[in-house]
Image: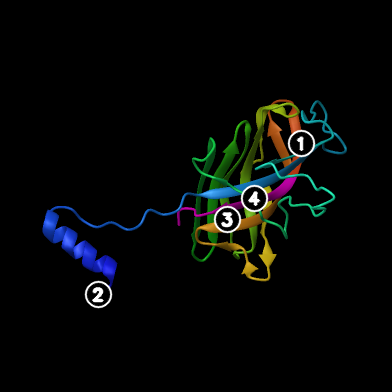
């Protein structure tokens, strides 16, 4: 019997009704990088409220400097920065379940910038689809959230030297959405990356 087990037995004997519990799991954490573009050719009676192109990320990543010339922005090779649920007004909620396929959903938000992923699935544990909603209420930005249709975004798990980055509880992926909208007149397209970790399984 290890030390923690002996402590539990002692506590139960001494306190009667008190029971030992598992350690508290670490809080969810994540990051995202989003680029929103106007659609070409334009769709009649619709426009992209962010203009020709707008990129934003959570958390903000330091710009390259002469001393540190390499970009640290989240992409298929780089994941250095994250926010943690409950810290500095950050919110990260997520669920990633692995079975015959991987199903996933989550929300990462800080201030007025957020990404929300729903009804996500990777049938072969590598590639699949999801519905993604984007928010950026600051200026430049867009006053209403923009959403893809159900299953309207292609999602591809990132592959590193450690393998495919999609498993129960965590995921690192790229996405591409041919259309994200706020009816009746807002219409854009989007692409980017997201990371979700310490998620419900």
Spatial CA distance of label 3 from label 1 is 23 Å
- Whether label 4 touches label 1, CB < 8 Å: no
Distance of label 2 from label 1 (alpha carbons): 60 Å
Q: Residue at x 53, y 56 (%)?
A: 103
Mark 2 against mark 1, which lies toward the viewer? 2
* Residue beneath disc 2: 1
- Among the two numbered marks 3 and 2 on one chain, the one whose residue lies closer to the N terminus: 2
Does 43 sit above or below residue 194? Answer: above
Does residue 193 show up magenta in the picture?
yes
Q: Earlier in the sequence, mark 2 or mark 1?
A: 2
Crowding at dot 2, Cα within 10 Å, few <14 / some 14-19 / many 20+, comes out as: few
N-terminal of the two: label 4 or label 1?
Answer: 4
Q: Are marks 3 and 1 in contact (CB under 8 Å)?
A: no
Q: Secondary structure at mark 1?
A: strand
Residue 47 x %, y % = 80, 29
**What is the number of the mark on residue 188?**
1
| Distance in Å between CA atoms under marks 4 and 1 | 27 Å
Q: CA distance from mark 3 to mark 4?
A: 25 Å
The magenta segment is 191-201
């Amino acid at each position: 019997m290890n030390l923690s087990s002996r402590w539990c037995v002692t506590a139960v004997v001494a306190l009667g009704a008190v029971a030992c519990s598992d350690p508290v799991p670490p809080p969810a954490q994540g990051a995202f990088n989003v680029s929103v573009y106007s659609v070409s050719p334009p769709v009649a009676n619709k426009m992209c409220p962010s203009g020709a192109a707008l990129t934003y990320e959570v958390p903000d990543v330091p710009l390259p400097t002469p001393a540190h010339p390499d970009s640290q922005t989240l992409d298929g090779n780089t994941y250095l920065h994250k926010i943690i649920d409950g810290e500095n007004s950050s919110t990260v909620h997520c669920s990633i379940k692995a079975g015959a396929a991987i199903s996933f959903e989550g929300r990462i938000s800080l201030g007025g910038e957020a990404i929300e992923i729903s009804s996500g699935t990777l049938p072969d544990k590598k590639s699949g689809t999801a519905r993604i909603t984007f928010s950026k209420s600051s200026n430049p930005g867009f006053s209403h959230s923009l959403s893809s249709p159900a299953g309207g975004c292609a999602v591809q798990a990132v592959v590193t030297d450690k393998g495919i980055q999609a498993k129960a509880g965590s995921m690192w992926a790229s996405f591409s959405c041919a259309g994200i909208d706020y009816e009746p007149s807002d219409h854009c397209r989007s692409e980017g990356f997201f990371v979700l970790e310490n998620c419900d399984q």
